[in-house]
Image: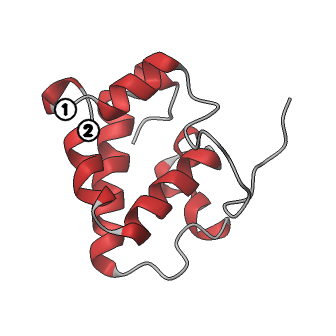
Amino acid sequence: MMGQVACSDPDPDPYQPLTEECDACLLDRGTAGCGDQYRECEELPACDALVLCELRQQCYSEPADAGCAAARGCEDKVTQQELELGEAFEMCARETCGHVCGFAPP
C-alpha cells in the first residue's frame, strides 16, 4: 500500500488513488455529479489546491468532522470564501459520489 502523499509532492494525477468512476462522478455537471461545485472552487487557486490536497490525503474517506484537512495542512492560507467553496464540493462529493468513491458519509 502506498504511503501518504504530502500536498507539495509532485503528482501527475492529483485524483489518484480514485477510480475512473469516482473521478467521473466528481467532475460530472448537474445533479449527476459535483462538477458545478468543483468549477466554482477551481476558479480560486487556493480552493482548488485545498480540494486536491484533501483528495490526495484521502480526507473524504474519514468523517467530515475529523479535521483531516486542517491536520494535514490542506487549509493553510485559505480564505473563508475558499474554505466555503471547498466545503460545498466536499459535501457534494460525500453525498452524491460517496457510494461510487467509497467516501465516508457527511
The kind of residue tagged 1 is Arg
Q: Nearer the viewer, residue 69 or 50?
A: 50
Q: Position of residue 80 (x, y in %)?
A: 32, 79
Q: Residues within 10 Å of mark 1 (few under 14, many from 20)?
A: some
User: Which numbered disc covers residue 45?
Assistant: none
Q: Which residue is mark 2?
A: 35
Q: Position of residue 62 (x, y in %)?
A: 58, 44
Quadrant of the frame with the C terminus: top left
Q: Earlier in the sequence, mark 2 or mark 1?
A: 1
Residues at circles 2 and 1 in contact by the CB criterion of under 8 Å: yes
Q: Residue at x 13, y 31 (%)?
A: 30
Q: Residue at x 22, y 56 (%)?
A: 40
Quadrant of the frame with the N terminus: top right
Q: In the displayed structure, would residue 45 be above or below residue 35?
A: below
Q: Residues within 10 Å of mark 2 (few under 14, many from 20)?
A: many
Picture quadrant of residue 58: top right
Local SS, label 1: loop
Q: Position of residue 59 (x, y in %)?
A: 58, 48
Q: In the displayed structure, would residue 13 be above or below residue 64?
A: above
Q: Residue at x 44, y 28 (%)?
A: 23
The kind of residue tagged 2 is Gly
Q: Residue at x 66, y 68 (%)?
A: 71
Kindly give the residue lying farthest to the left in the view shown.
30
Picture quadrant of residue 73: bottom right
Q: Position of residue 87 (x, y in %)?
A: 34, 58
Q: In the displayed structure, would residue 101 be above or below residue 87?
A: above
Q: Nearer the viewer, residue 53 or 68?
A: 53
Q: Which residue is mark 1?
A: 29
Local SS, label 2: helix
Is 23 placed left or right of 53 in the picture?
Answer: left
Q: Nearer the viewer, residue 86 or 99?
A: 86
> How much space separates mark 2 and mark 1, taking CA atoms?
4 Å
